Amino acid sequence: MDFLLNGKIAASWDTTDKNGKPVVNGFYYLVFQQRFTDGTHIRMEKTFFVAPWGRASDVQLTAWPNIVHGGESVRLTAVIGANPADGGSRLKIYSINGELVKNLAPSVGQMTWDLSNNHGQAVAAGLYLLVLDGRDPASGNPMHKTIKVVVLR
């Protein structure tokens, strides 16, 4: 994974951990920050999916953080096939008792949940199920992925 600055590689990660072993399949959030002697700095952030252990699942959905405290937001990334989930996909957030809490639509595979429901009210502490529904762009087949997020107050 490379970070480019003015078309040149500024930093690179070979997708191995500190022991030199390939990292597990998953989404990673990298921050590259450089401070210059004149006091200026640059910061680049990138979320991406790494699949060194063979073929990745057809649907990837990640939430960060997935144990979240009141006042924070959850950043969500969704990929269907090899493409970021688009506006034709929907993310539905359910309480543990099955109540639909919120609907979100991805934009270039990215969404943010501000811990509110569809009426703008803060959700209660608890476990929430996040369900991504979309279609595989190659086959047109429906695709689904469910993950859990814990909200603490």
Image (cartoon, rainbow, N blue to C red):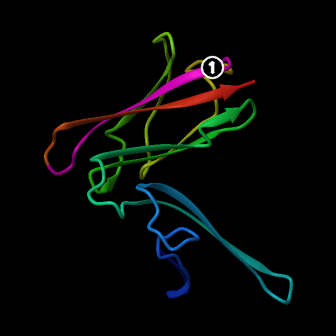
Between 40 and 30, the one lying in front of the other is: 30
Q: Seen from this angle, which residue lies furthest front? A: 19
Residue under the image location 85 percent in, 89 percent down: 38
Say left or right for 101 vs 89.
right
Between 23 and 152, the one lying in front of the other is: 23
Q: Main secondary structure of the magenta part?
A: strand
Between 14 and 72, the one lying in front of the other is: 14
Coordinates of residue 113 in the picture (x, y in percent):
58, 35
Q: Which residues are magenta?
A: 123-138
Between 91 and 107, the one lying in front of the other is: 91
Quadrant of the drawing holding the C terminus: top right
148 magenta-colored: no
Residue under the image location 36 percent in, 60 percent down: 51
Residue type highlighted by circle 1? Gly
Coordinates of residue 31 in the picture (x, y in percent):
63, 66
Q: Mark 1 packing: few (<14 Cα in 10 Å), some, or many (20+)? A: few
Coordinates of residue 50 in the picture (x, y in percent):
41, 61
The residue singled out by tag 1 in the image is 126
